[in-house]
Amino acid sequence: MKPSRTLLFSLLLWVVCAGLASFLPEWLLYWQLLGMGLFALLGFDAVLTRFLPTPQVQRVCAASLPLGEWHEVSLKILNKSHSAQTFTVFDDYPQPAEIQGQPQQIRIPARSGAKIQYRLRPQRRGTAQFSGVYLHFNSPLGLWQQRRYLPLVMEVKIYPNFATVSKYTLLATANRLGQFGIRQLRRRGEGLEFHQLREYRAGDSLRQISWNATSRLKKLISKEYQDERDQQLIFLLDSGRRMLAQDGELSHFDHTLNAILLLTYVALRQGDAVGLSSFSGETRWLAPRKGAHTLNVMLNTLYDLQPSLQSSDYLTAARHLIARHPKRSLVVIVSNFRDEDNDELLAAVRLLRQKHLVLLASLQERVLNEVLNESVENFDGALRYAATQTYLQQRRLAHQALQTYGVLLIDAEPEKLPVMMVNKYLEVKREGRL
């Protein structure tokens, strides 16, 4: 407990009276009685405060939260005392996170309850924990302030931001994927795997016509195809130190996880199996599997995976993947690739290309394009511009060396990576590269 403002004001008044009593001796007795009464009230109020029942608090929050999104958290407080009480409430939220609406002050009638809300924006993936709730309130006579801590442990899982997947689902349902940047390349009735026979429609190509069915039924019949299904996609996820690079609020690693989730959802909808292998940090392996539930399995596999301080070891990752999964697949290597990694990555690609089709999705720092777009106004600016151009030229040469080995390539800023990966995957499906 600590003194309230009322108590401090009362003590100040008593001290002023002491000064007056020193000049007016006849007031000394009254001053002493006033002090005795004040200290008796202090003790009585402290005893009452000690026996005040602790309020009951219940927290309402989703058990899983996407990274970087705002969420509502509610606290239901029940005042079990026989008098109205004013509480200042602060929830011990998981760190690191941004909050809005804390602390809050609320007055609750006797034997009644109330609810407060605040907003939470988590900034780190993994398992997080609410520890408890702090309550500040005044004593019954208002002379003391007391703080009580109510342990209210609650674990939540902070997942990669699946809001992108939700947006994709809505646009796919409304057939408006162009707003998302997804290019639907398939034309009506065309694909790689036979689907069904149907009557000829204006616009069908001659190669779609089934002449046997046409002659039998005495009318034009077309073959309808669909993209091949039951293919396999495996992410080779770099968890090394380069993925700690930060662009905006999220690291390259977090942007990568968002892209993986979106492409996983799209591939599963296409009827393909999706798997994952992480390297250069904590090793996690998810064998390719199909079905809508695979997206949840992927989320639970990745949500608490963090990048390490290790260097990226592409060759070891390739060897492990070949040993675990020799069946031909589209292997998507997601990394922050630099030209100095070229020799090792070429060796890894040569090994993977013996069995698989390889796509390298490399993240590009946003600052590079920002430097190129700046106006050069002095010598330091010119040096920075020239150094950036040199770096990008070396990067392009490294990419060209990879492409000569048949590697598909994406070089994108983090925010553009999800859509570019989906478009490249759909292009591979459309061209029958697998």
Image (cartoon, rainbow, N blue to C red):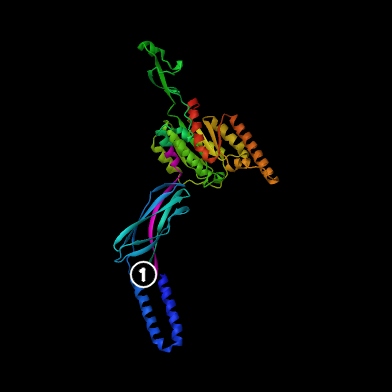
Give the residue pinned by disc 1.
139
Q: What's the residue type where badge 1 is placed? A: Ser
Horizontal side, residue 141 vs residue 168: left or right: left
Q: Is residue 94 above or below residue 376?
A: below
Residue 155: within the magenta? yes
Label 1 SS:
loop
The x, y position of residue 285, in whole percent, is 47, 40
Quick one: label 1, few (<14), some, or many (20+) residues within 10 Å?
Answer: many
Q: Nearer the viewer, residue 289 or 252?
A: 252
Q: Nearer the viewer, residue 72 or 303?
A: 72
Q: Which residues are magenta?
A: 144-167
In percent of width and height, residue 325 lies at 48, 34
| Rendered position, 353 above or below 6 | above
Give me the residue at 45% from left, 80% from top. Answer: 16
> Residue at left 58%, top 36%?
345
Residue drawn 43% across and 82% down? 17
